[in-house]
Amino acid sequence: MAATAPATPATPAGSATPHEHTVVNPATEEAVATVPAAGPAEVAAAVARAARAQRGWAALAPGDRARLLRRFAAEVDARVEELAALEVTEAGHPVAAARWEAGNVRDLFDYAAGGVERLTGSQIPVAGGLNVTFAEPLGVVGVIAPWNFPMPVAAWGTAPALAAGNAVVLKPAETTPLTALRLAELALEAGLPEGLFQVVPGAGPVAGAALVDHPDVAKVVFTGSTAVGKQIAARCAEQVKRVTLELGGKNPNIVFADADLERAAAAAPASFLDNTGQDCCARSRILVQRSVYDRFLALLEPAVHAFTAGDPADPATRMGPLISAAHRERVRGHVPESRPAAIRGTVPAGPGYWYPATVLTDAPPGDPVSREEVFGPVAVVHAFDDEAEAVRLANAGPYGLSGSLWTRDTARAVRVSRAVAAGNLSVNSHSSVRYWTPFGGFKQSGLGRELGPDALASFTETKNVFISTEE
């Protein structure tokens, strides 16, 4: 059912009916909640409510819209611990990471609120009159959020869409709806109009498809696999519907011989083990210049073992479980735990969808594990001889989302950054995502850009108006 703001995020876990979904804690394998699953009728009703709410929202003075969004950010800020606890429960994220994610939602709404009163048109000099442009809201935006970062990625689309004067219907992933439902409640508590921001939990092929296909949804924002993203793009094309896609990645971490090897090796584990590797920006291909290859691996091994897996509620935990039993089987399909590994970490015994940190050195560049997105805590290490080979290896494959390079040579950093076909690169860092800067991919890693100073503009249509001054 559509949830503008239910009385509670979900009901206690029980035996789910065909129209419900059971949320499972991936660290304990225990059912923690049962959530109603929306069908096409519920999605259609939510879109109708959103369309009505959007007209009033767009008519509000920009300062009033900005004030309400800041109030929403303040409500999120007051509930950071609560939201983080939900994220730990439904996604298995370590609590320190979950706190950051809740804070990131707050920051995204604060940042978007600052753009409301700066979403300006332009005056263009023309003969015979006055020509002006307006940035008009699209209407209703459908946001389909993933399970790997349920809170922040939902806000990537929702915050700028609302700030630009649109309404949002959010479909969270089936496995992680709890934070989305709570955010919908907080939006109402902050004073956002009823129906403006709604959450419709449900299955992707049912609720997600209904949202994509609805003629009154003007734009779809999707984060997920490249395969599903292609399906959504095709369905949107039937209605010439706007779409932003943030899809898969198989990202390189390039380490040159002149790099600070100790620093590069110490930073590498987090680049592919954060969120248990369930990150489209994971640097799962480590490319190391041959002359320092052995030294780098010797430094990498203790750093990987120090990246401890354990109870997500423990602040000392760095890595939690995978999201589900089914996903663990997918990861095992790429890399069975019996496969020899250069480095393999440890995980807790007992319940939970655990998979150890794994580093392979025997997978050639053409091996599927070197080319396909594993979406687990697995990295492959390859040697290269020179800059040209590093760029060739980095650009191999269909993806181009993110990547890192480590060097003390500034000129090389500029050359290689320009040569690598990826949308988000970091030099001597693995930072990919900042809400102040644009994010998106090349090739089959997506379409469009999210975040940054231009985020609001992607949720508007430019209207041109000419006013004749001739008598």
Image: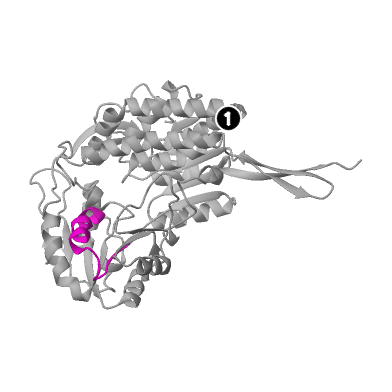
Up-down relation of residue 2 to residue 424 (above or below)? above
What residue sits 9% from the left and 46% below the top?
A: 348
Q: Residue furthest right?
A: 471
- Examine the structure image and report whether residue 100 is included in the region drawn in magenta: no
Range shown magenta: 251-272
Q: Position of residue 149 (x, y in %)?
A: 32, 44
Of residue 425 and residue 52, the one placed in the foreground of this image is 425
Relative to residue 74, is residue 438 depicted above or below?
below
- The quadrant holding residue 265 is bottom left
Tell me if residue 176 comes above or below residue 14 in the rendering.
below
Q: Does 106 sit left or right of 98 as displayed? A: right
Pick out the residue farthest to the left. Answer: 349
Q: How many marks?
A: 1
Q: Within 10 Å of the Cα at label 1, are there few (<14), some (14-19), or many (20+) other Cα atoms?
A: some
Q: Position of residue 438 (x, y in %)?
A: 45, 50
Location of residue 119 in the rendering, given as x and y in whole percent from the top left corner? 58, 39
Numbered disc 1: secondary structure: helix
Asked if residue 265 shows in the view, the reply is yes
Q: Is residue 438 left or right of residue 80?
A: right
Q: Is residue 37 left or right of residue 113?
A: left
Tell me the quadrant of the picture where the N terminus can be found.
Answer: top left
Q: Amino acid at mark 1?
A: Pro
Q: Quadrant of residue 407?
A: bottom left
Way the structure is coloured: one colour
- The residue located at (51%, 24%) in the rendering is 193
Side of 148 where 62 appears, left or right = right
Magenta-colored stretch includes residue 254: yes
- Residue under circle 1? 62
